[in-house]
Amino acid sequence: MTHPNILILMVDQLNGTLFPEGPAEWLHTPNLRQLADRSVRFANAYTASPLCAPGRASFMTGQLPSATGVYDNAAEFRSDLPTYAHHLRRAGYQTCLSGKMHFVGPDQLHGFEERLTTDIYPADFGWTPDYRKPGQRIDWWYHNMGSVTGAGVAETSNQIEYDDEVAFHATAKLYDLARGRDDRPWCLTVSFTHPHDPYVARRRYWDLYADCAHLMPRVPAMEYADHDPHSQRIFDANDWRGFDISEDDTGRARRAYFANISYLDHKVGEILDVLDRIGQEAIIVFVSDHGDMLGERGLWFKMSFYEGSARVPLMIAAPGLAPRTVAEPVSTIDVCPTLCDLAGVSMDEVMPWTTGESLVPYAEGAVRTTPVAMEYAAEASYAPMVSLRYGKWKYNACTLDPDQLFDLEADPDERTNLAGDPAHAGTLTALKSKAAARWDLERFDAEIRASQARRWVVYEALRQGGYYPWDYQPLQKASERYMRNHMDLNEVEERQRFPRGA
């Protein structure tokens, strides 16, 4: 296929340490395990930013938040930023999204020709953090530990209802694509909100983990005073003092999280089964926007550069790429240029500004010589934070905090900060130099503050008087669905049948 079809399966807040070479053996994920067996599995893939909207904007554009301006969950994703959907559509693809992408601003498509569902989160500026007010908690949308203490079983919830709808529309779209009324190649992105908290799961998946040996974190909860400054800010933002998290709470929350991975596995299985039954071939990408700390160190959710929050699963099944595990560190910003590479679509006109790089050479055995970069500039931060993963090293920096340096081969749980160890002074100096060449942290901070201040003015103004939100309204023409009186019934039944009758 000159321009192969592409199916992107995206999930939300899936901890990449649970996917060292595909799903861990103890996870009940038969469909994802089958996909892993035929995929290139990137064991050390990292988010561009450990939060939904900035991580997703970076994933789509191949650029870090400092370039996109999507610093947090209420920063506008500008219309002039090309995404993989733009690049593929420009080359003749039909592009479609079912599910979440957390676009903020009036553009709710960003290159997608069709969007099948609304988003699960608001599209306006109401979730804007404010660096002018360090320590402020915005109760109505900040995370709190109620997601942990309230963990358990439910047959439906806000998020379950959403993901059921996402999967339904995705499978319906695959049948529609198979009918062949449009001969263009297609790129379908199916984006779920699970296993994102709250940690609530259906009984059938909850019961799979009754005897799970992984309900307690490997690194137990620590005293507040023993945490690094940013982790303390996360605790404060999550209102930890208002909750008493017991081991039972932790076990139930992790059990529900694992159960929701199995729920997602079921949804992925439904989609891949339809793809197989309609005889459509496609490149398949499985990825998450960021991870979840899952109680490690007592931390939950994301917002951190620690492995549980920052590392994500990434698997690519494509013709010509032999299944294997790649240990080289890679980034979600590498997905956009990888898709274009695999599809034979040029990104030359934007490559001077795009920092992601194609993963095809690494899938074929090349050694990475460039560091993987991450940024964080949202709630629980008072100044931008940056990180480099380079070989076995991870270096974290913020103007407010002491440097962090971890040897991930010797210390995968990041228990020992080597930044103050004279034996590693040379490594620290080299990584500080690489970071300084990449980032002007004072300028970065000023740009974030200006963006936040502008958005607070705009949001407060637009909530006065008439309110016209940007939330996406899926388009459906009832008069063109199923059977209507301007249609020929015989033609409708034959056109909608797949495969066609004799």
Image (spheres, grey):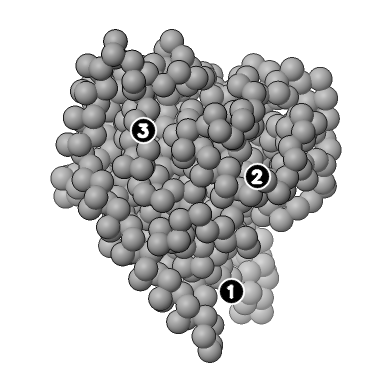
Q: Is residue 382 visible?
A: yes
Where residue 27 sits, quadrant-wise, is: top right
Q: Earlier in the sequence, mark 3 or mark 1?
A: 3
In the depicted structure, whether residue 491 falls above or below residue 305: below
Tag 1 secondary structure: loop
Q: Is residue 189 visible?
A: no
Label 1 is placed on what type of residue? Lys
Which of label 1 and label 2 is nearer to you?
2
State the image coordinates of residue 444 (x, y, percent, origin top left).
Answer: 27, 51
Residue for point 62% across, 77% down: 479
Which of label 3 and label 1 is nearer to you?
3
State the image coordinates of residue 182 (x, y, percent, origin top left).
Answer: 44, 56
Q: Earlier in the sequence, mark 1 or mark 2?
A: 2
Q: Quadrant of the N terminus?
A: top left
Where residue 235 sits, quadrant-wise, is: top right
Q: Which mark is residue 240?
A: 2
Where residue 490 sits, quadrant-wise, is: bottom right
Q: Which mark is residue 402?
A: 3
Q: Are marks 1 and 2 in contact (CB under 8 Å)?
A: no
In the depicted structure, whether residue 306 falls above or below residue 106: above
Q: Residues within 10 Å of mark 3 (few under 14, many from 20)?
A: some
Residue for point 57% across, 47% down: 236
Label 2 is placed on what type of residue? Trp
Q: Which residue is mark 1?
A: 477
In the depicted structure, whether residue 189 falls above or below residue 15: below
Tag 3 secondary structure: strand
Q: Residues within 10 Å of mark 1 (few under 14, many from 20)?
A: few
Distance between the alpha carbons at the discs numbered 3 and 1: 57 Å
Distance between the alpha carbons at the discs numbered 1 and 2: 48 Å
Q: Nearer the viewer, residue 187 or 158?
A: 158
